[in-house]
């Protein structure tokens, strides 16, 4: 009588482990990059809110403000990854900045101007 063997050989198991390792080597860097980009959305969203608040103030008083709290811009949250400020203010111009204050974003910096131009001055997601 023939003996029926069931199961996987060591070679088959090693091939499966190698394939999983290759897939993980491809997927993990992409995951880290997408995670970093999602953290940058905090800066983008808050700078757009700062732009809208400053434009509303300018519509009322014909000038921009340098003090972000005076126009009602006070970001809240336990995990604020950026610090915000306004510079280059005159009656017709302003620039708002968001600078990362966490190590995982590696000096990431964003800027928005009175023309609603949002720019990444220093990309921390490389």
Image (tube, rainbow, N blue to C red):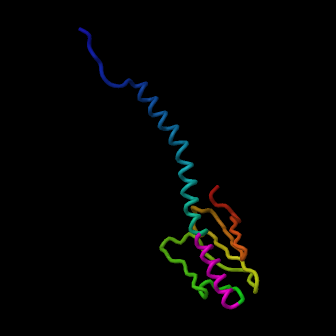
Within the magenta stretch, is there residue 51?
yes
**In the rendered image, which quarter contains the C terminus?**
bottom right
What residue sits 47% from the left and 37% below the top? 20
Residue 16 picture location, percent across and down: 44, 32
Q: Is residue 28 above or below residue 54?
A: above
Residue 63 picture location, percent across and down: 72, 88
- For the image shown, how many numbered marks are present on the structure? 0
Asked whether, in this view, residue 122 is left or right of residue 42, the answer is right
Q: Is residue 40 above or below residue 115?
A: above
Residue 113 picture location, percent across and down: 71, 74
**In the rendered image, which quarter contains the N terminus?**
top left
Span highlighted in magenta in the image: 45-61
What residue sits 61% from the left and 68% below the top? 44
What residue sits 64% from the left and 72% below the top? 98
Q: Residue furthest left?
A: 1
What residue sits 70% from the left and 85% below the top? 64
Within the magenta stretch, is there residue 42?
no
Residue 35 picture location, percent across and down: 54, 57
Q: Is residue 22 above or below residue 101?
A: above
Q: Residue furthest front?
A: 59
Magenta: main secondary structure equals helix
Depth check: give the residue in front, 60 or 35. 60
Depth check: give the residue in front, 113 or 98. 113
Q: Residue furthest top?
A: 1
Asked whether, in this view, residue 95 is left or right of residue 10, the answer is right
């Amino acid at each position: 009588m023939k003996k029926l063997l069931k199961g996987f050989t060591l070679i088959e198991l090693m091939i499966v482990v190698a394939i999983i390792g290759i897939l993980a080597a491809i997927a993990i860097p992409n995951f880290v990059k997408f995670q970093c980009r999602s953290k940058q959305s905090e800066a983008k969203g808050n700078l757009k809110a700062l732009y809208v608040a400053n434009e509303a103030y300018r519509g009322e008083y014909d000038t921009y403000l340098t003090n972000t709290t005076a126009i009602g811009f006070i970001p809240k949250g336990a995990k604020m990854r950026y610090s915000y400020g306004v510079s280059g203010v005159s009656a017709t111009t302003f620039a708002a900045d968001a600078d990362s204050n966490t190590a995982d974003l590696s000096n990431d910096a964003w800027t928005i101007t009175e023309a609603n131009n949002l720019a990444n001055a220093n990309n921390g997601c490389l």
